[in-house]
Image (cartoon, rainbow, N blue to C red):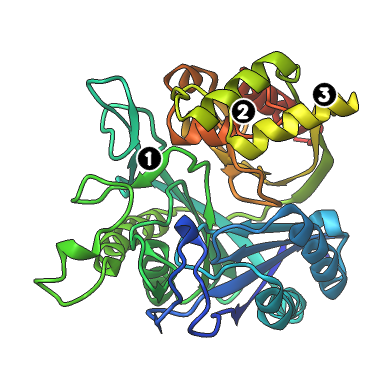
Amino acid sequence: MINKLKAGIAREIITPKIGGLLSGYGSDKPSTSVNDDLTVTALAIEYEKTRVVLMSATVCLIDNNLTARLRALCGAAANVPAENVILSATHTHSGPEMNTEYNDQIFIPKCVAAAKASVKDMKLAKVGVGKTESRVGINRRKLTPEDRVLLSNNPWATFDPEMTVISFMGEDKKTIANIVHYACHCTAAGINTEITRDWAGVMIDRLEMESGGTTMFVQGMQGDAGPRLPNGEDKGDASSFSNIYGASGIVYAMELGAIAALDAVRAYKDIREYRDEVLSVITGEVKLPHAPLMSLEEAKSELAKLEAGTAGRWTVGNRSNLTRIIELHEKGETGEAFFVYPQTLIKMGSIVFIPVPFEVSSEISLRLRTYSQYGHTLALGCTNGSNSYLVSKDQICRGGYEVERFMSRPRQFVDNVDMHLIDQNLQLMKNFVS
């Protein structure tokens, strides 16, 4: 018998208890209700002796330590190596604060349960791919006449409009599972107190209804891509609807989600062919170079400006960061030359998944896709860890929120770290056997 691809999918509810803090925006307001349940979805894919588990959790971010722990636990549950577990966060800002209580009582056991269940009833599957242009997202780095960058819609700047739907069809011609890949912050609901998957939840539910297959959403490189909202901002505003619906800003998420649902269904129905595909995995590491540590004199000068309230917008990092730089100098420590993270690339035919543990500028995704030899090169942001923002070189000169977060670490990356990220993943892809 010819070996063929198999797929299995499982889902668990990970909704936190009402009253806990939500993750996005550092809000100190406890949650008051559940608009829609949060979930973790695990898709197991197997070919011959190779098996991977791709997981999507509707939370804001999953830090590096928790990610490593979960990949090991979920790998053991699904009988795969830890490096073959890909753990992605959808980046909803209306998800729970990832504290010890929530993680231990709900998040970790539910992730493990989903991974374990995903391999129990795997079926022979063929793979189809559809894609469309979606205007759900928009660049969110608005440039003002004063040469400032704000978190608002910028219709002239770069963003990635491509939405991809990957579908797995069983021998009975029924859809087993779908993956939707798109790059856009899940912040349409804004600063609210309702637990929600944000706009992506509406899209997921609708595609499941239309296809009959369990659907997961995986984030793309959404570092500078926000939701395209009528208020022109990168998040919903409750006051805009209070006199109309008596509702919160979550109305924005539901409206935008309906548009995303139309796009996802269109891409799904555009799939013309389902094929037998071979699954392959490449593991390695990515080494992103650090720039030299800021000098002791400059760090002290910047700290003095902060304390005097005279720091300019190009100041590097915040007070704690500058203090850390000074401490490193005083200890005679220069830090590591590279930031190194383990990498796992997954390939099915012309589809390649590239996990990246940062919130990455969308231009980097566009370049990576263009340079790749594979037709569907899908970079997964907020995946296999969380290390703040990673921006393209051209954005650094303008500053803004993403750049400030990118620079807010004692050991900063070199300015062209984007090219290092792209090049090293391209080099790893060369190890795939076509």
Q: Which residue is mark 1?
A: 161
Q: Residue at x 46, y 30 (%)?
A: 309
How far apart are labels 1 and 3 at the CA level? 45 Å
First in sequence: mark 2 or mark 1? Answer: 1
Q: Where is residue 388 drawn, in percent x and y?
A: 60, 43
C-alpha span from label 2 to label 1: 18 Å
Q: Is residue 406 left or right of residue 414?
A: left
Say which label, 3 or 2, has the lower sequence index.
3
Query: In percent of the image, x 35 and y 68: which residue is there?
Result: 192
Mark 1 / mark 3, whichever is N-terminal: 1
| Mark 1: secondary structure | loop
Asked which secondary structure carries label 2, the reply is loop
Left or right of residue 238, residue 298 in this image = right
Graded by Cα atoms within 10 Å as few (under 14), some (14 to 19) or many (20 or more), the crowding at tag 3 reads some
Which quarter of the rendering shows the N terminus?
A: bottom right
Spatial separation of the CA atoms under disc 3 and disc 2: 41 Å
Across and down, in percent, residue 158 comes to: 38, 28
Q: Nearer the viewer, residue 235 or 159?
A: 235
Q: Amino acid at mark 2?
A: Ser
- Indicate which disc residue 329 carries: 3
Query: Disc 2 marks which residue?
Result: 372
> Percent from the top left, x then y, of residue 282?
81, 42
**Quarter that holds the C terminus:** top right
Answer above or below: position of 121 versus 60.
below
